[in-house]
Image (cartoon, helix red, strand yellow):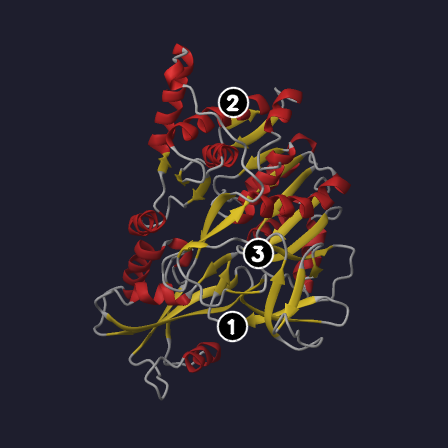
Amino acid sequence: MAYIGEHLETSAWHHPNSAALKCASTNLTWNGFFDAVQKLEAAVLAQTVPGARVALLLSDPAATLVCFFACARAGRIAMIMEVSWPKPRIQELIAATQPTLCIDDAEYQALWQKNQKAADTNDPTKAPKPKTPPTEGSDFYAGFTSGSTGLPKGYVRSHRSWLESFRLSDVDFDQIHPRRIVLAGGVSHSLHLYGAAHGLHRGISVTLMPRFDPRTVLAELQADGGGAALYATPTQLQLIVEAARRTGPLECVPLVFCSGAKWSGEARATLRKVFPYARLVEFYGASETSFISFARSGENTPLGSVGRPADGVEAAIGDPADPAAAGVSGPVWVKSPLLFRDYICGTAPETKWQDGWLTFGDHGFLDEDGFLYLSGRGNRMVITSGLNVYPEEIEAALLQHPDISGAVVLGLDDSLRGQRLEAVVELKTTLEDPERALADHCRARVGRAKCPKRFHIRDKLPLTAGGKPDIPAIKDSLDGGQSEVRQMESQAL
């Protein structure tokens, strides 16, 4: 019976005083990390029942990981939320998901102190409930990504789905044996959470960045003689590459994991100059699917492809019962043991099941050699800086402004972010300093990451014959740079 976090005792036993987790001023040994996890595990066991949902709203990524593993080992579901989200959004999610326990910074300290007091007094009435280890099929984690209704989709994963994902990542770790893992950001991003969980589960020291800073990442990669594996989004990697132009190549990095967007041939060549001896591993997938395909350096992946489907993953185009021929584009369907179970909140009309196969909105095609290429999405979802964003959510937030009569949000090509968000807005009246007003309004409702980088003000939005905003015409006008469009930076970077 395997589960996430089952090997922490072994790491604490064999390497009690070796580094396990570093995050800003927090430095935990394996013994210290396991002790912290055990204390929170006891607190969670005492206040919840098996399968209960536990919302984590912690500003410290290290504390989040402690609670994450405590919930996993206790057989509970850790729901990781971003503390920077607008308060109404957090309240809406809490109401929709109904967690048994909410752990914020204050509650974390209270649980810690309460557990420590019980341990000091040896009070038998405060002993944790007997624990039955979770099964592989048990749910243990819920993450959140944009949904078409405006309420984020809460997707649930089982122990088995992540253990199978670990198996695929182990291929690279078993061959290269990195000494540490460096994560370019906090664990609210699923890529960084996965990298941290995989490393700690496997017994590898993990370094987290509470806030992304390329110079700090470069310094950490070179610390202790190097030998670290790096997890980063394409946007983060581009900024790291820019910073490394002034410091020189990092010959001490053996492994780089990247997800979130396809790298161009030129960008990949530049990345190779910065990490000349690293194996570059690009993986394609989604929150609902985990890994779908891999493209590794040295495998001669064709330009534009996201690689071949991973071991144990089947991919089909169009209809899994009657797949499209090579080169024919259509919805991407996936079948594997890595798939998520269900949504606990939010909706996604593009996510569909068929006889164990899952499709989630991406379109693409397979060539004759089995390489997968992406050709777009069947809906309007935008991927910006590795974040999945539904324009409808931002449009709904903009339309809450009393001076806006119409709004369309688009994703435009961007060399840094993959795509950048821009909004075309029809105003009822003239606003003083509209770029600041609209950006402030948007950030307060959907957060900084989803705030458009530019606002384009128009007297009238073009409409279709059915009276809806003519999105293709609006996008064409932006691409063509027509003079009637007034561009204004939102200062949302």
Image quadrant containing the C terminus: bottom left
**Place of residue 491 in the rendered image (x, y in percent of width and height, measured from the top left):** 38, 58
Q: Which residue corresponds to the image point at 47% horizontal and 66% vertical from the top-left?
A: 381
Mark 3 residue type: Thr
| Secondary structure of the residue carrying numbered label 3 | loop
**Place of residue 200 in the rendered image (x, y in percent of width and height, measured from the top left):** 60, 34
Alpha carbon distance from label 3 to label 2: 33 Å
Query: Which circle's residue, 3 or 1, is located before the other in the chain?
Result: 3
- The image quadrant of residue 224 is top right
User: What residue would you read off at disc 1?
Assistant: 378
Residues 218 and 310: in front is 310
User: What residue would you read off at disc 3?
Assistant: 289
| Secondary structure of the residue carrying numbered label 1 | loop
Closest to the camera, between mark 3 and mark 1, is: 3
Q: Which residue corresponds to the image point at 70% horizontal and 43% vertical from the top-left?
A: 170
Residues 32 and 489: in front is 32
| Secondary structure of the residue carrying numbered label 2 | helix
- Circle 2 packing at 10 Å, graded few (<14), some (14-19), many (20+), is some
Residues 372 and 257: in front is 372
